[in-house]
Amino acid sequence: MCALILAVDVGYSPGGAKAAGILFGDWADEHPERVLTAHLGLPEEYLPGEFYRRELPALLKIIEPALPETSVIVIDGYVWLGSEQRPGLGLHLWEVLEERVAVIGVAKSRFHGTPEEAEVLRGTSRSPLFVTSVGLPLEEAKGCVLGMAGEHRIPTLLRYVDRLSRSG
C-alpha cells in the first residue's frame, strides 16, 4: 500500500464537533482519494494555551483509522508556537502518535512571535501562510505546501477539508 498524505481539520457548532480528513497521494493533487468524517459530542472547554486538548480527541477519530497508510499529516494550526518554539497542536499530535508520522502545521493567522522563516507566500497573495513541522525539515515542509494544487493563498485541498469540517 502506498503512503498517503492526510489533511485534517475540526469544525465546531452548538451541537458538537465535526472532524474531517482527506487522503491524497501527491502534493499536487486537486482531488482527494478518500474523505473521512466523524461527528463528536461537545468538545472540552477552550483553555488559553491548551488548544490541543480541545482538538486532539476529534482529530484522532479521523487519524487513527488512516494512520497505517499515512506518511504525513497536515493540520490547520501550528506545530511550534512563537520564537520560543513552544509545543503547539502539531507537536502534541506527533507525540501522541509516538513520532510515527511527520506533521506539518499550516496556519492562516500569525501567532505572536512566529519567525519569518515560517512564512510561505502562495500564488499572488501578499498575505502569508505560516508553516511549521516536526519529523520533516521546515524547508521541505514549506516546499510541500508551495507545491499543493491551487492558485490562491490557501491550497485547494486544505480549503476543501476546512469546508468539510464546517458542513453539517
Image (cartoon, rainbow, N blue to C red):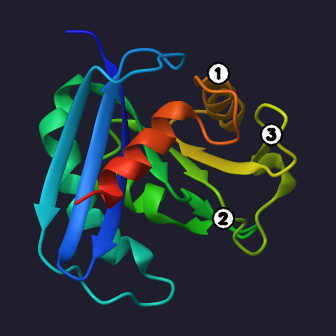
Cα–Cα gap, marks 2 and 1 = 25 Å
The x and y percentages for residue 105 are: 54, 49
Relative to 82, is 1 above or below? above
Q: Which residue corresponds to the image point at 23% horizontal and 34% vertical from the top-left?
A: 35
Mark 2 residue type: Gln
In the rendered image, the quadrant that contains the C terminus is: bottom left
* 102 or 26, nearer to the observer: 26
Task: Tell which circle, 1 or 3, labels the residue nearer the N-terminal end.
Answer: 3
Mark 3 residue type: Leu
Q: Which residue corresponds to the image point at 23% horizontal and 44% vertical from the top-left?
A: 63
Which residue sits furthest front? 168
Q: Secondary structure at mark 3?
A: loop
Q: Which residue is mark 3?
A: 121
Mark 1 residue type: Gly
Q: Is residue 54 visible?
A: yes
* 130 or 165, nearer to the observer: 165
Which residue sits furthest top? 1
**In front: mark 2 or mark 3?**
3
Cα–Cα gap, marks 1 and 3 = 11 Å
Task: Tell which circle, 2 or 1, labels the residue nearer the N-terminal end.
Answer: 2
Q: Secondary structure at mark 1?
A: loop
Image quarter for residue 123? top right
The x and y percentages for residue 58 are: 22, 62
Q: Which residue is mark 2?
A: 85
Q: Which residue corresponds to the image point at 19% horizontal and 40% vertical from the top-left?
A: 36
* 41 or 67, nearer to the observer: 41
